[in-house]
Image (cartoon, rainbow, N blue to C red):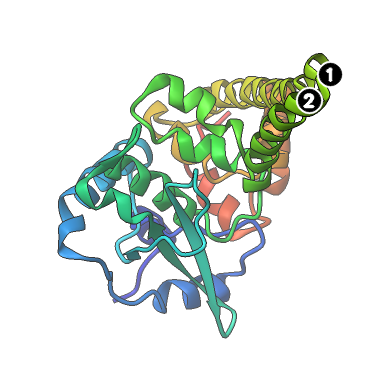
């Protein structure tokens, strides 16, 4: 059976920013069957429903496993990308504590939805808005906004080290005012960075809602944009953005699909 590009996108396969049609088709055809434990099924259904509501799609075939190896203390899960002969496949790793369906402040279906969005963006190497997009799958409003405070593991490790080292040094050297200022400054930087990025993301999101034929598809659209495009959309007028899209609409498989979802000017 011959599939159209829209059929693949409806199944959750998104062409990457620099992915050629041949590479895209090779990746799609080599995904294999889903692999996960039976106990995951009800939580996976919830996660899939959440993604379908936000994106209109979710990946049909994923390998998911419970395993703590390689995860930091504060990580609920992770997406690992396995490359075989140039074709990328995704493995979702979930902390074993989630076998009961929840751990600390997170539910298993929320973690699955988060990592599944990362999997749909497997061909994207766009670190600035990646976590903002992934946390957008949360059903909790404050987590959608403040969840992406930490982007890379070392940022949380550094925050904990600064706080811990400060406490120890204060016992011996009484450097309280200076030493406790370090974690506050680092945490302040992370917070300001998040506020700046969220502001730009929300500006771009408003523009996207004006562009797409159906506002329900706005998040699916922005989730397939690059960091540079999100920044551009957040700073330019609707007229300038339409002019930009007209120039690049046939430049890639990704924009071929995105252009079909835009209202004609």
| Residue 262 rendering spot, x and y as whole percentages | 51, 36
Give the left or right position of residue 99, taking residue 208 as reference.
left
* Vertical relation: 97 (above or below) 252: above
Task: Name the one closer to the observer, 38 or 221.
Answer: 38
Within 10 Å of disc 1 (Cα), the crowding (few <14, some 14-19, many 20+) is few
- Locate the N terminus and report the quarter of the image it occupies: bottom left
Based on the displayed image, in which of its 4 quarters is residue 206 positioned?
top right
**Can residue 236 be seen by looking at this rendering?**
no
Q: Residue furthest bottom?
A: 85
Rendered residue at 53%/59% (across/down): 122
Front residue of 87/142: it is 142
Task: Kindly identify the residue that appears in the image at 35 percent across and 58 percent down.
Answer: 59
- At 49% from the left and 78% from the top, the residue drawn is 26
Residue at disc 2, secondary structure = helix
Q: Please name which of the two marks, 1 or 2, marks the residue nearer to the observer.
A: 1
* Residue 126 at x, y percent in the picture: 66, 48
Observer-nearest of 232 and 21: 232
The x and y percentages for residue 188 are: 72, 20
Residue 38's place in the image compared with 247, above or below, is below
Marks 1/2: CA distance? 7 Å
Number of labels in the image equals 2
Nearest the camera: 93 or 63? 93
| The disc label shown at residue 178, or none | 1
In this rendering, the answer to whether 57 lies above or below 230 is below
Q: Does 50 sit above or below residue 115?
A: above
Residue marked by disc 2: 182
Q: Are marks 1 and 2 in contact (CB under 8 Å)?
A: yes
**Seen from this angle, which residue lies furthest front?**
172
């Amino acid at each position: 059976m011959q599939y159209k590009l829209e059929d693949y996108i409806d199944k959750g396969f998104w062409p990457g920013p620099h992915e050629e049609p041949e590479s895209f088709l090779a990746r799609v055809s080599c995904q294999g069957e889903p692999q996960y434990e039976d106990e995951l099924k009800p939580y996976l259904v919830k996660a899939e429903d959440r993604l379908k509501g936000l994106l209109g799609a979710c990946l049909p075939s994923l390998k998911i496993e419970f395993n703590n190896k390689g995860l930091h203390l504060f990580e609920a899960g992770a997406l690992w990308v396995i490359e075989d002969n140039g074709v990328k496949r995704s493995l979702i790793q979930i902390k074993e504590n989630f076998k009961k369906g929840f751990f600390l402040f997170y539910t298993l279906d929320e973690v699955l939805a988060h990592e599944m969005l990362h999997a749909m963006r497997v061909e994207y190497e766009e670190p600035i808005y990646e976590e903002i997009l992934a946390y957008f799958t949360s059903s909790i409003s404050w987590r959608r906004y403040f969840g992406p405070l930490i982007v890379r593991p070392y940022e949380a490790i550094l925050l904990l080290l600064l706080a811990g080292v400060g406490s120890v040094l204060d016992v011996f050297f009484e450097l309280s005012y200076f030493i406790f200022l370090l974690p506050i400054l680092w945490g302040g930087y992370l917070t300001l960075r998040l506020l700046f990025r969220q502001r730009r993301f929300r500006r771009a999101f408003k523009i996207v809602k004006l562009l797409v034929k159906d506002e329900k598809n706005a998040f699916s659209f922005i989730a397939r944009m690059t960091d540079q495009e999100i920044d551009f959309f957040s700073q330019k007028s609707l007229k300038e953005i339409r002019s930009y899209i007209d120039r690049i609409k046939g430049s890639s498989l990704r924009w071929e699909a995105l252009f079909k979802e835009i209202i004609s000017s």
